[in-house]
Structure formats: structure tokens, C-alpha cells
Image (cartoon, grey):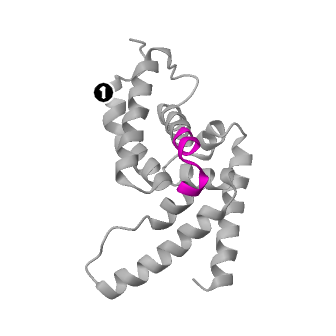
Amino acid sequence: MVADRPPFEDLYRDYLGRIYAYVRAQVGTSADAEDITAQVFMNAYQAYARFEARNQTPAAWLFRIARNATLDHFRAHGRRERLRRTIEHQPAAEEDPAGQAEDRIQYRALLAHVAKLPERQRDAISLRHSGLSFDEVGRLMSCSEDAAKMLYHRALKALKEAVQKEGV
């Protein structure tokens, strides 16, 4: 084992939840998210001997695999499926039924707006909200850290304008 590379079991334990959350936010169903997450870690395990920690962080490496697996899923199922599943995805239930209903309405509206963003802006938001730094987001998206920041902030601006326009 390379000295600067953690054991794969540690990566699995440390990143399973974050990778699953990222994939689930993309596909919107737990069954697909579980399948894709399992594939991500299978691919990562098979490629782990080639991973070099000095070239990228483990998080950036795993999220690149997750992003590619998610894109492969949507290539197989089509963009329309992505939009439908994103809009149908619901937040966790809360105890207050009235508050829960209002939260779901706002959440669905926001997800509908996110789904309408250009793909690179959607990716910037998803990756950033999965806990990656702007540098890691930029590397995953094959752009500079500044470009990743710009994509993210343009996406937030577009979401803010859309929400204000519709009064969500």
C-alpha cells in the first residue's frame, strides 16, 4: 500500500453517506441511488491501486466516479427521467403536517427550478452542497476553481431570480 493513501475501508466508511446523498439528490429515488452508489464503490475499489493521493483528494476522486456513474445512468434512461425524478423527490417527513405540506411545496418548486438550470450549474450546486471545496468542484468539472465559483454563484443567482419571479 502507498503510504499517503488511506485503506479503502476507511474511504468507504468516511464517504458512503456523502456519495449516497449526492447520487440520491441527482436521481431522486433510493433504489436507483443505492444501485449507483454500490457501482461507484465497486468502480473505486477496482481502480484504487491506481489512485494517487498527491494528485487529488479522495473526495474529489470518489465524487468524479459518482458523477460519471450518475451521468451514465441518465444516458441510459434519458434526461426526461432525470427531470421527473428530481421533481418527485421529497424531503424527509416532519412532525407538523401543515409545516410539512408548506415545506414540500417550496422544496418541489426549488427542485423544479434546479432541474431547469444548465447541466454545469446543476453539477456545481450538487457537488458544492455535497461538501466539496470549489477547487475540488473545479477539478471534477474540468475547470478552474474560479470558474467553479462563477458557475455556482450564477446558479444561485438564477435560482434566486426564479424563486422571486414566481413567489415561491
- Which sits in the foreground, 117 or 80? 80
Residue found at x 51% / y 55% = 129
Which quadrant: the N terminus?
top left
- Main SS, magenta region, reads helix
**Above or below, comparing residue 123 to residue 136 in the picture:** below
In the picture as drawn, the residue positioned furthest to the top comes out as 1
- Which sits in the foreground, 107 or 5? 107
Task: Give the left or right position of residue 128, taking residue 144 as reference.
Answer: left
Q: Percent from the top left, x then y, of residue 123? A: 61, 50
Residue found at x 51% / y 23% = 53
In the picture as drawn, the residue positioned furthest to the left comes out as 95
**Above or below, comparing residue 154 to residue 16 in the picture:** below
Q: Percent from the top left, x then y, of residue 55? A: 58, 23
Residue found at x 62% / y 51% = 124
- The residue pinned by badge 1 equals 9
Is residue 75 a member of the stretch shown in magenta? yes
Residue found at x 51% / y 42% = 73
Q: Percent from the top left, x then y, of residue 65? A: 51, 33
**Above or below, comparing residue 155 to residue 126 in the picture:** below
Q: Percent from the top left, x then y, of residue 40? A: 43, 34
Task: Indicate the quadrant where residue 68 lies.
Answer: top right
- Which sits in the foreground, 162 or 148? 162
Task: Give the left or right position of residue 70, taking residue 10 as reference.
Answer: right
Q: Which residues are magenta?
A: 72-81
Within 10 Å of disc 1 (Cα), the crowding (few <14, some 14-19, many 20+) is: few
**Circle 1: residue type:** Glu
User: Does residue 4 appear in this view?
Assistant: no
